[in-house]
Every structure is written in structure tokens, then in C-alpha cells.
Amino acid sequence: MVPGERAFEGIADVNAVSGSGSPKDQQRLERRFATRAVDTYSSSRIGGFLYLVAWLPIIFVTGIQERYAIGCVAITIALLLLATLRFRFRPPEQAGMSQRRWLNRYVLVVLSSTAIWSAIQVWIVFDPIIVPLAKSVSLFGTVALCSVLAHLYTSSLRLSVAGVLMLIMPTVVALWWVPDLHLLAIAMTFFAGY
């Protein structure tokens, strides 16, 4: 492969799927989508439940369930629904564009949980009643989820990068915004480089 050729791989994929590629290219592309779809699903189907595993202890460590009971219940239900959808949303049997569409939709489901967690983290950082130690405990969840996204989705670079950025960037900005949390901001900024 020539350097820089990978940047144009998506264009070649679209041409092959749309029929402008050779039959051999079409078969290779369909196998690649099938492999990527099966790998992505099999390695991440229970990953949505990790958000719940991180969220439920945070509720009690921070005490936010006492002040925001309805919000906590709504977040728990949303994470549970997304985790269930992610588990049940299997790749299609047909090859080709249906698997590509499935991958695009599956990425949206995965990133929906990630967006919710990012919002939770920003909420915890800005809540003045939550003590800094509890805020740092919640950051462990963010670090763990970033690590999972970075290492689990190696076959889908856009999902991995989008998920990590979605988790890290709002959290780092929020930490730098609160003067008492600059030490945590430094740590998360260094982690972001990882």
C-alpha cells in the first residue's frame, strides 16, 4: 500500500459497493464489511452495560440521587435501553451495503451511550456540592471507558476516535473551567495524549 492511499480507501469502498469496481473488488469489500460488522458486534455487544456499571456507583458516591432523583432514574433507564439495544442489534446476514448501513447505525447506538456518559461527567464536574474526591472517582469511569473505546474498536478507527474525543474533550474543558480542579485537569490532559 502506498503511503496516503488509506485516506482514499473510503472512496474506493463506495465505488466498489456502488458497482463501479470489479467483481473481485466487490467480493473483497463485502468480506471486509462482513468481518468488520461481526468483529464489532461480537467485541462490543455487552459494552453498553459498562456505562451502567460505572454510573450506578457514581450515583451513590456523589449523592446526586438525593437531589436529582428523576434525572438519575431517567439516565439509568436511557443507559439500560441503549445497552439492551446494543446487545440485541445484530449485524445483518446479507453482505455489502446492508452491513455498511448496520455499522453506521451501530456506531450511533454506541456513541449515544458515550454522549450520555460525557454529559454525566460534565454535570459532576460542575456540581458545586459534589466533593472533589467523588469527582475524581467519576473520572476513573471516564478513563476506563476511554481505554475500552481505544482498545476494543481497533477495526473501526472512526468509532474509537469519535468516542474517545466525545469522552475526553468536554471533561477536560470542564475541569479546566473549575479552578479547584486544575490538578485533575492536568491529569486528564496528559491522559488525553495517550
Image (spheres, rainbow, N blue to C red):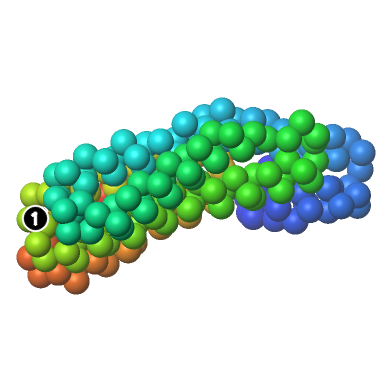
Horizontal and vertical percent position of residue 61:
14, 44
> Camera-side residue: 167 or 83?
83
| Type of amino acid at the residue the image marks with label 1 | Pro
Q: Examine the rendering and report whether any part of residue 24 can be seen.
A: yes
Q: Is residue 58 left or right of residue 156?
A: left
Q: Would you identify the image quadrant in which residue 38 lies? A: top right
For image coordinates 27% across by 67% down, the residue present is 173
Q: Would you identify the image quadrant in which residue 106 lies? A: top right
> Camera-side residue: 136 or 188?
136
Pointer 1: residues within 10 angstroms few (<14), some, or many (20+)? Answer: some
> Camera-side residue: 39 or 111?
111
Determine which residue is flagged by label 1: 132
- Compared with residue 153, is residue 163 higher up or lower down, i.e. above or below? below
Horizontal and vertical percent position of residue 169:
34, 61
Quarter of the figure with the N terminus:
top right
Figure label count: 1
Q: Secondary structure at mark 1?
A: helix
Horizontal and vertical percent position of residue 101:
71, 48
For image coordinates 77% across by 43% down, the residue present is 98
Q: Going by the picture, which residue comes out furthest to the top?
A: 42
For image coordinates 68% across by 44% down, the residue present is 102
